[in-house]
Amino acid sequence: MKKILGIAVPSLFLVACGDPKIDVSSDKALARSIQIVRDTLAQEKQPLFDDAINTITLSQISAETLTRAGVKNESAVIEEQLKRALAGKTGEEIIAYADVLSEY
């Protein structure tokens, strides 16, 4: 039992101390988590993060997506795609993902 606790407790501590991630469970959680993730980045990386969010947002908008959103008269289609693209990512992962998207 002590061996299990000796492994489990430090493991939980490491998981809890990880970098904050984007929470897409609600619009409020999304906005709050984006701000938290941004604030935890080094100051010189914050503009890169801002640019990355813009790049990822724009990458989710295609002619097909705009057509579907217009037909339904709602932006929920685009919002859901953006949430899927950001969900669970750290600030560094968002910057790296935007770099990959920029290569295309």
Image: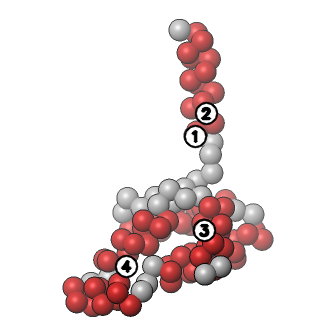
Q: Count the numbered circles shown.
A: 4
Q: CA distance from mark 3 to mark 2?
A: 27 Å
Marks 3 & 2, CB-CB < 8 Å contact: no
What crowding class fits label 3: few (fewer than 14 Cα within 10 Å), some (14-19), or many (20 or more)?
some
Q: Amino acid at mark 4?
A: Ile
Are the two marked residues, 4 and 2, in contact with CB atoms closer than 8 angstroms? no
Q: Earlier in the sequence, mark 3 or mark 2?
A: 2
- Mark number displayed over residue 16: 1
The part of the image, by quadrant, that contains residue 55 is: bottom right
Residue occupied by mark 2: 13
Q: Quadrant of the C terminus?
A: bottom right
Q: Residue at x 38, y 68 (%)?
A: 27
Residue, disc 3: 97
Q: CA distance from mark 4 to mark 1?
A: 31 Å
Q: Earlier in the sequence, mark 3 or mark 4?
A: 4
* 36 to 13, vertically: above or below: below
Mark 3 in CB contact with mark 4 (< 8 angstroms): no
Furthest residue toward front: 104
